[in-house]
Amino acid sequence: MGIGKEMTTENWGRICDGLQSEVGQDAYKNWIQPLTFLGVEAGVARFNAPTSFIGNWVSRNYSDNICALFASEGENVERLAFSTGGQMPKKPVKATPKATVVATGSPELPGAPLESRFNFDNFVVGKPNELAHAAARRVAEGGPVTFNPLFLYGGVGLGKTHLMHAIAWEAKQRNPDARILYLSAEQFMYRFVQALRFKDTMSFKELFRSVDLLMVDDVQFIAGKNSTQEEFFHTFNALVDQNKQIVISADRAPGEIDGIEERIQSRLQSGLVVDLHPTDYELRLGILESKAEAQARHYPEVVIAEGVLPFLAHRISTNVRVLEGALTRLFAFASLVGREVTLDVTKECLADVLRASDRKVTIDEIIRKVADHYHLRMADILSPRRVRSIARPRQIAMFLAKRLTSKSLPEIGKQFGGRDHTTVIHAVKKIEELRAVDSQISEDVELLRRMLEA
Ligand code: ADP
Ligand code: MG
């Protein structure tokens, strides 16, 4: 297969599209975009890279993705080869302007660009994110630094980046002179490595230590990257010593990030650690309503039938990004075909999205996992027995059923051996209270939630 087939820039373009969705925007911009594709010869894909570091990095981290994508274009690629210099990309600095700035030691603070719609006004607050939102507001207000760092964590698409941008916007507005730096951990590393490369770590240090508010997104990325961690740690300490606010985000709690040194973990935990819980139905509906309102400004002709948004809030529970994408597609579709968006139109237009999010946690699975975790039988959970060693796991299972499924309280009660919905309410309240004061319970719940959502 693929013998004699010319790999064109068009093929490479499609591979790039694939890579972009596989590795994410940041990684794509930093590592893939700077490459120039030269061609494939005898199983070797050749590229020109602006620096050998970038070449090595791509080779080490993205070889598998790239080879697989070549295969999907019908080309067998076994290895990547990188040259540097010689044939330079047309715009070699395009994807690396930040590194260039560090290298020249500019006093500017060029962070990652802030998304204008990621502001507090557009952030819908509900139970799952109210604490994170309140903490973010507090930080944005400025004032005396009360918790440092603010550590926000939670699964993909739950609003971490949105909140960080919102903090930046708000803080800027309140204090236009404040030096605010927002960037992903990957960009932090990239700049650090560039500074090393250009033997200019002094301006790197100066730059990072002169900010008033530093926000580093997706810090799990520096796990296992030792020298970056070290530098991050020093930057972190220097800023804390100066009483400068730091905001960090990650996809997991500080203690759960493998490959981060313990002293750094404990430093990360020393402020306020808040998690963004998976969205619940009410929050999803609120978000949909707010986004539909925004969309309606672009597509005033589109009419959304009653019941469509609740339907989507029920059916798409994965993450907010997916929810948003679904709505955007729906509006575009409706505007093109000039039809009212009924439930049927919705199902037709979003068939793939709806199918993909069909994988839902069931109450059965929850009961089974919780029983396993506490070395009980499922029958114990369903039984009327009230000893603490059974009652507590049962309450946890009910709590998880409420949080992770879209079942109503009476339905949940019914599946738990025919209990009343007030028993479920009580269980949910109880576990909410206990989670705040009992770290064992809070860890158990967290662990179970992750297992169930995996
Ligand atoms: P994360 O960084 O946690 O992966 P993002 O902040 O990128 O998630 O959020 C993903 C998308 O969902 C963004 O478009 C964001 O605006 C939207 N989003 C997430 N939570 C909310 C919310 N509570 N209100 C409004 N939009 C939200
Ligand atoms: Mg993010």
Image (cartoon, helix red, strand yellow):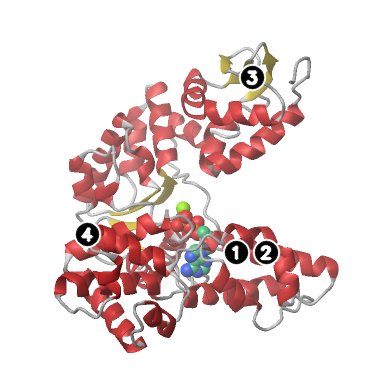
Instruction: Tell me which corner region of the image, top left, top right, bottom left or bottom right, holds residue 35.
Output: top right
The picture places residue 446, in percent across and down from the top left corner, at: 30, 60
For discs 1 and 3, the disc positioned in front in the rendered view: 1
Q: Nearer the N terminus, badge 3 or badge 2?
A: 3
Left or right: where does residue 254 sit relative to residue 31? left
Please give the residue where the numbered disc 3 appears in the rendered image. Answer: 88
Location of the N terminus (image quadrant): top right
Q: CA distance from mark 1 to mark 3?
A: 39 Å
**Residue 181 shows which numbered tag?**
none
The residue wearing badge 4 is: 375
- Whether residue 274 appears in this view of the structure is no
Q: Residues within 10 Å of mark 3 (few under 14, many from 20)?
A: some
- Do tag 1 and tag 2 residues touch (Cβ < 8 Å)? yes
Which sits in the foreground, 270 or 287? 287
Residue type at mark 2 is Thr
Q: CA distance from mark 1 to mark 2?
A: 6 Å
Q: Residue 119 placed where, x, y %? A: 50, 66
Mark nearest the camera among 4 and 1 is 4
The residue singled out by tag 1 in the image is 324
Describe the element under mark 1 as helix, strand or loop.
helix
Q: CA distance from mark 4 to mark 1?
A: 40 Å
Q: Amino acid at mark 1?
A: Glu
Using the rendered view, name the quadrant where residue 343 is placed: bottom right
Tell me residue 430's x, y (percent).
Answer: 24, 78
Q: Looking at the image, is 338 positioned above or below residue 186?
A: below
> What residue is rendered at 43% in x and 39% in y?
186
Choose the circle earlier in sequence order: 4 or 1. Answer: 1
